Amino acid sequence: MAFVRTHERTKERFSLLLLDLEEYYFEQHTAYYVQSSSKKKRKIRGSLKVCSRSVIFDPDDVAEPIIKIPLRDCKKIDFVEEEKNPFNKPRTSAISISCVQVIYIKESNVIAPYRNERGANEMTFELEVWNKTEDVVQMLLQLHRASYLEKLGDQTAMIAANLQSRLARTSFDKNCFQNVAEKPHMECAVEMVMPLVSNPGHVCITDANLYFQPLNGYPEHVIQIKLKQIRRIYKRRHGLRPLGLEVFCTESDFCSDIYLKFYNTADRDEIYYYIATFLENHMTEHTAESYMLQWQRGQLSNYQYLLHLNNLADRSCNDLSQYPVFPWVIADYASAHLDLTNTATFRDLSKPVGALNKDRLDRLLARYSGMPEPRFMYGSHYSSPGYVLFYLVRVAPEHMLCLQNGRYDHPDRMFNSICDTWKNCLEGATDFKELIPEFYGSDCSFLENKLSLDLGRKQNGRLVGDVVLPPWASDPRDFLQRHKAALESQYVSEHLHEWIDLVFGYKQRGSEAVAAHNVFHPLTYEGGIDCDSIEDPDERIAMLMQILEFGQTPTQLFTSPHPQRITSQFHNMTRSSSINSPVSELSPVSQPEDSSFEDLTEESRKWAWANMGNLTPISSHKVHKEAVMDIAVTGDGAAIFSTSQDSTLKMFSRELKDFQRSMSFSNMPLSSCLMLPDGKTVVCSSWDNNVYFYSIPYGRRQDTLMGHDDAVSEICWFNERLYTASWDSTVKVWQCASDGSSSNKRSPFQLLAELEHDAGVNTIGLNPVGTLLVSGCKDGAVTIWDTSSFEVLQKVPCHTGTIHHTAFSPDSRHILSVGVDSSMKVIDVQTGMMMSNVKAEEEQRCFCWDGSSVLCGGQSGDLLLWDLLSNTVTKRIPAHSGAVTAMWMNDLCTAVITGGEDRQIIFWKLQS
């Protein structure tokens, strides 16, 4: 298990888990435990561990038990000086401890419940210490006095003062630097956090390494992490306070290299930003939205995505009160065969565990309705230290013994059967727990009693051993494989977003949580209570302990509905050619209906985008007197049309490599152009408020559509419909009575709808199947329209100024927009959620994209290839001497034409 690995730094029997919760281990001394009998003395060599609430003797002989003496049970602590040694050897001194209770741990080196020996008479232990005996006695007496203070707050304050005094008297040993030339940046006192325990010491960061040196030298003298090996760092809340910092040197989100808790936020932040600055050249900071985009597009599995969300929501394997939480996904643990094609096999992911059983929910709601504020539906949480160790007791028995004062849980209440555990989560009055990541991993040891632990005997007489599996699993490994297959199944992929809404999203709190029956105790929510504002120290500490042990709700990551995943079913529904679809390398290939050819085309596009960095210029031509505004290509690729601010439409011959025609319809700039499906007509929009139709065979203007009160900024065509956008704040939808090539003087267009906006519309685009329209305005808003009902589906304020270009992804699931504010925004069509916000170094004017990668034309004139999943530029390709203002790409994505403010059009080809 991930957090068990944290304690594999040492093979010693002693562990911080032998301490009480919130107890510190200060120092150790070589010592002898002197056992006196009527005949002779027997000395057992070992080490004396001085802790904040106990004294622990750890014998070298593993056959001997570890002895723990709670300071609160001590009646007397004395210093005993030994008589002079006749051989003039160094004298030893002894400590005599009288107590009423002693705890024996790991007797015969077996992990088992602790044996407590308590007697009416005092027991006396004599411990010979090799040096500093008087100092040890003084320290024990001081800690002993603290343990006798009546108030828990006073005890804690006195121990904390002792700890801080020790930390202040010591500092990081710079002799531990790996290189004498290292330059230290800062050092401060911290605690290294591990499951249930923490270890005080000093952190030091240099220009090459991050070091942690424990105050007590346990488990090693110093822990070193090379800065160049760090891949990710996360700020953490610990005990509901912003004091944590977790460091990862691998891409795994399951196990970090170190988790540090600082004593003040300023120190934490200084080290965080120092590391972040050091790593900014080779470390990408991912957001929940960027991971969401990867998951939606199939680049992250459901398991990986949930791990990422847990990590971003402050869940850590080093903090059992905030351990990663995963959902129950299967509801059938009784059948002999697991049918992942049957929806009845799965749990309803739209409901929390507490709402899955209607009868139980009705009882809970009746109690909730009569409860005073603040009300809650569930008195226990879905994730807590007790629940985590309930699942992991077979691989982390010492953690369970630490949590439960040296005892395992009652055998009948332990994790005995997966089916019974699921049944209790459905029917139990206080059991609403979810799962942990181990249920979907590859290590099945948590299901097997490989350590041969004596976990007790149930009421039916059966010993607690391996976990009983459902009938459909042949063994633990098979169970995990099938369970993980269920998590990655079609059903779960289509519904996982509903569970994310409950745990990490907008149904986590507020009215949406109430409506979803998803309300837990107020103490479980971030910001539910400010412990620092509680003046009574006893009350404050009790409150903090309750919060840590009860469970905590993850940090809220999403405040609007989470989009659904794109599965193969959706891919098939939305796969289509682009709207203006002149294909080939600029040469034609008519696409048959054969699906195998469609798959081949899709593979070709994937290959093209994977190699888009190899885009090479073939030729460039200066055909206009002003900036190029738009480009259209005939179906056979022979003729390229371009519009310009010089008010002309130019036709360029690919064969002759020169422009052949120049048409002028007015003295105003032509803003955009497109090719009609007949291949014979070019449609142009103009700043003079009109739309012009140009006949290629006849070489003349064929029709004029006068429909706006201001400049027409862009036009789209689909299925005999023309969409025109204007700076008069409208998009108009026109139905063509014929194919749009009529020479009748009367216009063949009938106005179907007028879509009103709050500002001038600068750009529009249709999804590949023509069912959705997106418009981008001068006020920075993006609006998504249903083209059948002409209703607004989403309106998202995105940019701080004019939107230059916006377009759907090929699968219709996302919209990308670029604007005058130099940012690129990805919006989820279904929810309107902004999934990615990339701030570019320069203004982007136009682009083509496949949903993950973007080929952008920038203000500088270069083409930039962006990876939206990592928010980075992967290639910069020099292109124009002025801003790139127009871009066209063929359907196979192997050929590109760009136009710019430098009046040129450049032809590009993707090299193999």
Image: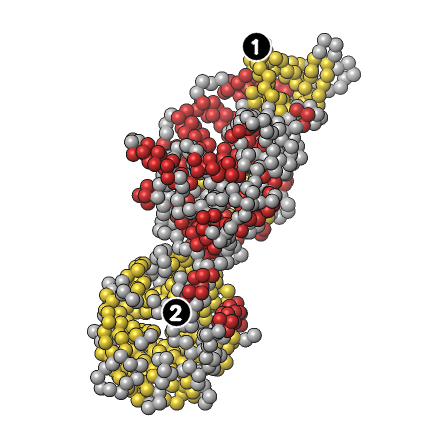
Question: Is 819 displayed left or right of 144 in the figure?
Answer: left
Q: Callout 2: helix, strand or loop?
A: loop
The percent coordinates of residue 812 (x first, y second) are: 39, 64
Q: Quadrant of the C terminus?
A: bottom right
The percent coordinates of residue 625 (x first, y second) are: 35, 83
Q: Please, which residue is most extreme toward the front here?
A: 336
Q: Is residue 912 above or below residue 776?
A: below
Residue drawn at point x = 38 percent, y = 63 percent: 815
Q: Is residue 868 above or below residue 696?
A: above
Q: Name the kind of residue labelled 2 in the image.
A: Pro
The percent coordinates of residue 808 (x first, y second) are: 38, 66
Residue to which mark 1 is pinned: 120
Residue drawn at point x = 55 percent, y = 19 percent: 71
Residue to which mark 2 is pinned: 768
Q: Nearer the viewer, mark 1 or mark 2?
A: 2
The percent coordinates of residue 510 (x first, y second) are: 32, 42
Sort mark 1 into few (<14), some (14-19) or many (20+) by Cα contacts within 10 Å: few
* Relative depth, front residue between 748 and 903: 748
Question: Is 657 displayed left or right of 203 in the figure?
Answer: left
Sort mark 2 into few (<14), some (14-19) or many (20+) by Cα contacts within 10 Å: many
Is residue 816 in sight in this rendering? no
Q: Name the kind of residue labelled 1 in the image.
A: Ala
Residue drawn at point x = 58 percent, y = 41 percent: 1
